[in-house]
Image (cartoon, coloured by chain):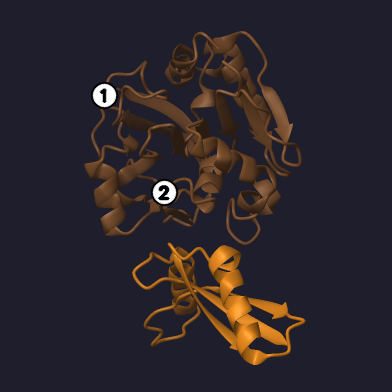
Amino acid sequence: MKARVYVMPKAGVLDPQGKAISHALEGLGFAGVNDVRAGKVIELDLAETDPAKAKSAAEDMARKLLANTVIESFRVELA
Amino acid sequence: MKAAIVVFPGTNRERDMRIALKRVTGRDPLMLFHREELPKGLDLVVLAGGFSYGDYLRCGAMAAQSPIMKDIKDFATKGGHILGVCNGFQILIEAGLLPGGLLRNASLRFLSMDCHMRVERAGTAFTSRWQKGAVFRAPMAHGDGNYFADDATLDRLEGEDLVAFRYTDENGTVTEAANRNGSARNIAGILSPNLRICGLMPHPEDLVDPLMGGTDGLPMFESLADTFVSA
């Protein structure tokens, strides 16, 4: 079973990468971009076949390693 | 003083740290590869700068999970002294031994330059040779040194006097311009509640000899040598 972990800078945490991307988009002439936040996506291929267990395992992995919950939030989606 | 420097794949400041420790103790510290066990009887463990594991995932995140970190956490629990500089600070934070997080520099630029720091907490194993308010110069070289913590954590650090160093100008004034990486409240280095774990981004070990261009960083290592004078 595949799981996708979305890791994003927490609301309120400065995201200089998002800001730089936003400025670059503006420089390219894309108008109307109010804000950009940049995070990462981690794909997991899990042996677990039970969706609830797979999700809970992925969340545990995110809490312990994939995200630093002091500065990042995460969300798990099963694919 | 029995000191050990931990070397992870990608650590690259361990020899600078060895020079600094040898200068004050007269003997070489142990160099430990991350797969080794932490020997008993150490006074000080140092996590040096570099780019452990290529900064994969987050700076310090991989090293924080490496086998030797379990020993280092035990060492911390037993009251051992630990110094983390630059990537070493990032590893201590990722391992949960110090609070907060280190974000990408606010400018998004890798900063390689000298900075000035003011000693906020004197009288610790790392700072006893300085007076509170002393200002010293240190090189810095990092891309992710922007210290972040929520307001409650920052208030606690300040309330419990656990901010070790702050970025200031050369006169010791806290300014925005002196805070090149954008750290919360100009924080450059912090201490654990028992004052035995210290992490900071700049490199005091790189100014410990006139041949390096100054000895501004030497008091940190003299402080440590004083602390473990009999060992």
B60 and B114: which one is in front? B60
Residue B144 visible, this angle: no
| Chain letter of the residue carrying label 1 | B
B111 and B222: which one is in front? B222
- Label 2 and label 1: CA atoms lie apart by 23 Å
Report helix, strand or loop for mark 2. loop
* Chain B shade: brown
Front of the two marks 2 and 1: 1
Name the mark on residue B132: 1
Q: Position of residue B190 (x, y in %)?
A: 38, 39
Report helix, strand or loop for mark 1. loop
When the figure is inspected, residue B2 is found, relative to residue B12, above or below; the finding is above
Residue A49 visible, this angle: yes
* Residue name at image x 37 percent, y 49 percent: B183
Circle 2 residue: B181
* Residue name at image x 57 percent, y 64 percent: A64
